[in-house]
Image (cartoon, rainbow, N blue to C red):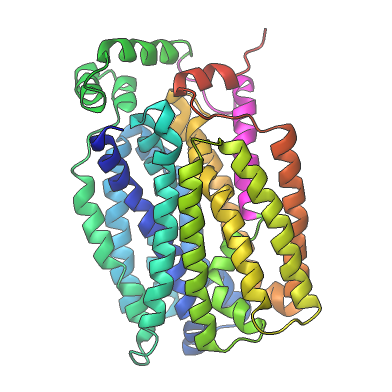
Amino acid sequence: MNKKILVWSITAALAGFLFGFDTVVISGADKKLQALWGSSDAFHGSVVMAMALWGTVVGALFGGIPTNRLGRKQTLILIGIFYLISAIGSALVNDPYTFAFFRFLGGIGVGASTIAAPAYVSEISPAKDRGRLVALYQFNIVLGILIAFLSNYLLRNVGENAWRWMIGVEAFPALIYTILIFTVPKSPRWLISKHRDEEAKEVLELINPHGNANELMEKIKIESQSHSKGENIFMKKYRFPLMLAFLVAMFNQFSGINAFLYYAPRIFEEAGLGESTALLSSIGIGVTNLIFTLLGVFLIDRLGRKVLMYIGSIGYIISLSLVSMAFFLEWEGLAVPIFLFLFIASHAIGQGAIIWVYISEIFPNHLRASGQSFGTSTHWVLAAIIPSLVPVLFSSIGAGTVFMVFAIMMVFQLLFVIFMMPETKGISLEELSKKLIRDDK
């Protein structure tokens, strides 16, 4: 693999590190903030905790616009600035509303990054390595999650303002990422779509110094020209990739993954573990997530996206059913953490490894950012709604019922994988475009 492509992919994927850190760092401050501001469960869940996720929805809905117009690289720079402002602002505030505003800004960065970073990496990658290079984004997400859990644990005793340090420390990686992203080139496929052929040729020659840049440019142009201007992802011929993006994103969230990551310490306390043990168990979740994501990155271009989804779906069904039973039957001790570790492993090797890769592959070049915006918006709308309901659902219908609903949804995911999901391993973006678009005959 070209070392330059690897370095650029890792740099762009660092947006995922900030995504993971930003998403989970709030879990360490969860109960402290509720006590500090005397919030009800409904207000705390839907405003204080979930405002970042609503920002993510906005970022996902509208992130395709700058990704298309300004380019993948410029959008990634803007994302770094949003993360930086959010981290500093939310650490310094003294009321829940301003806190929610700055968390909302960070959420915009998260949502836009789920479009710009996978699009950028998929467009600079050779087909044979595309899966693992785009999956580096997911690896960075789980690395960010692990570091956030670890950071929360280490900062838990720095005084009554420990939550400020937990949240504010994100400013350091945000600054480093923002500086580094200036060093990557622009996406050649985006440059071609903007008729900047000379710049595109220079980047393609950097990506593949031994290949024929003119020949590849011609293939990309032919694919672009085969579609008429003014097209959008909601046209009939794009219905199949649109449906795939929607279902992959929907099932990702109906596994309960974001609800669990947001409230991991609270879930462990519900299962009878003490506060300190609950935070420590959260670190175990982060380690498990990291190990199995690495395994997913290693296997995604070897076994393919579909095989990983089979493994993940079966693991989800078993682990979520066991977690549900543990709550119903009041199993104590380490039963719940062990089953949830299995749940995280299933997510990491399946949905976690493939979601951003898959959504970045299935749309044609000229509609990639718009298609990803649709898929990631589906993901983040559900990721905002489901965790918002967790405190209320736990206190009303109980954790056992919540996890059983997630298990049933994963049975439907398995059926989707068996009967509907096509494999995308090792196929060029232009070939995939031909395969998945169903023109009326």
| Image position of 145 with respect to 59: above or below | below
The residue at 48%/35% (across/down) is 301
Q: Main secondary structure of the magenta part?
A: helix
Residue 242 included in the magenta stretch of the image: yes
The residue at 48%/39% (across/down) is 357
Percent position (x, y) of residue 216? Answer: 33, 14
Quarter of the view holding residue 429 = top left
Q: Residue furthest top?
A: 441
Q: Which residues are magenta?
A: 229-253
In the rendered view, does 418 fall on the left or right side of 169?
A: right
Q: In the image shown, does 321 or 240 lie closer to the viewer?
A: 321
Q: In the image shown, does 67 or 203 lie closer to the viewer?
A: 203
On the rendered image, what quadrant is the C terminus found in?
top right
Quarter of the view holding residue 29 = bottom left
Percent position (x, y) of residue 423? Answer: 59, 30
Q: Residue furthest right?
A: 329
Percent position (x, y) of residue 268? Answer: 61, 79
On the rendered image, what quadrant is the N terminus found in?
top left
Q: In the image shown, does 310 or 257 lie closer to the viewer?
A: 310
In the rendered view, does 327 fall on the left or right side of 105?
A: right
**Residue 111 showing in the rendered view:** no
The residue at 30%/78% (across/down) is 92
In the rendered view, does 202 fall on the left or right side of 260?
A: left
Q: Residue furthest bottom?
A: 159
Percent position (x, y) of residue 125? Answer: 36, 31
Residue 176 included in the magenta stretch of the image: no
The residue at 80%/76% (across/down) is 328
| Image position of 163 with respect to 352: above or below | below
